[in-house]
Image: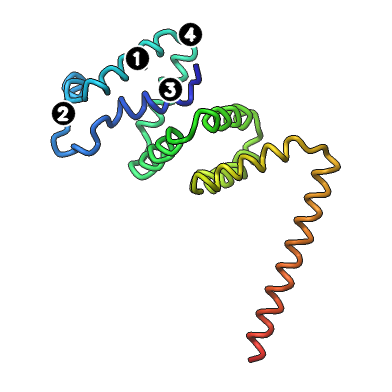
Amino acid sequence: MKPLPLLWCLGLLASAPLRAQAQAQPSSDAERFRSMTPAQQEELRQRFRELKQLPPAQQAELKAQLERLNSLPPAERLQVEENYKRFQSMGPAERQEVTERWQKFKQLSPEKQAELRAQLRTVMDASPEQRKQTFENMRRWEKMDPHQREELRQKFREQRMERKQRLQEHHELRKNR
């Protein structure tokens, strides 16, 4: 059982099961449940059973995360929901990889986390093809030994310098016109 997908499912189901019908939004949890489709009701029941099988500490952690999700400003919450939809649209292997990387991420320093958050936004905003290529590149990188990685870093530095130099030359040419 992976807590991250479960958290998002619980958060989305508990917080906005019928966002498209906002005008007729039911006023109680029971009314919201009755207004769900049978499939949504069954999914919610299944998630509830899964939640109850978790250890109490993990249940408490999920509850705290759900409360944080519910307390987000609407714009941030919408972004979280969009990210969740993208996550759900990924294949099982891709979701597994994202989940494993999330576990590693939580063990990093706050500075490194901030850097990687920016990179993650880039990956999540990418098309499925670009995302797949990024994951393939990451897998290749992980398989490299330190010497191979350093050679690749050097090659990237050289390419960056060449691009920078061409850009400067281009600007100088435009300036001299």
Q: Identify the residue position indicated by label 1 in the image.
A: 46
In the rendered structure, which disc, 3 or 4, sits on the residue that comes first in sequence? 3
Secondary structure under badge 1? Answer: helix
Which numbered mark, 3 or 4, is in the foreground of this view?
A: 3
Residue contact at pointers 2 and 4, CB within 8 angstroms: no
Outermost residue, bottom direction?
177
Spatial CA distance of label 3 from label 1 is 11 Å
Q: Considering the image in quadrants, where does the C terminus appear?
A: bottom right
In the rendered structure, which disc, 3 or 1, sits on the residue that comes first in sequence? 3
Q: Is residue 73 above or below residue 66?
A: below
Residue contact at pointers 3 and 4, CB within 8 angstroms: no
Q: Is residue 167 above or below residue 116?
A: below
Q: Amino acid at mark 2?
A: Pro
Q: Identify the residue position indicated by label 3 in the image.
A: 6
Residue contact at pointers 3 and 1, CB within 8 angstroms: no
Q: Is residue 23 above or below residue 2?
A: below
| Image quadrant in which you'd find residue 146 | top right
* Residue neighbourhood size for the residue with mark 2, other residues' Cα within 10 Å, grouped as few (<14), some (14–19), many (≥20): some
Which numbered mark, 3 or 2, is in the foreground of this view?
A: 3
Q: Amino acid at mark 1?
A: Gln
Secondary structure under badge 4? Answer: loop
Spatial CA distance of label 2 from label 1 is 22 Å
Q: Identify the residue position indicated by label 4 in the image.
A: 55
| Residue 11 position in % (x across, y down) | 36, 27
Which numbered mark, 4 or 1, is in the foreground of this view?
A: 1
Spatial CA distance of label 3 from label 4 is 14 Å
| Residue 167 position in % (x across, y down) | 68, 73
At x 22%, y 20%, the residue is: 38
Q: Identify the residue position indicated by label 2 in the image.
A: 26
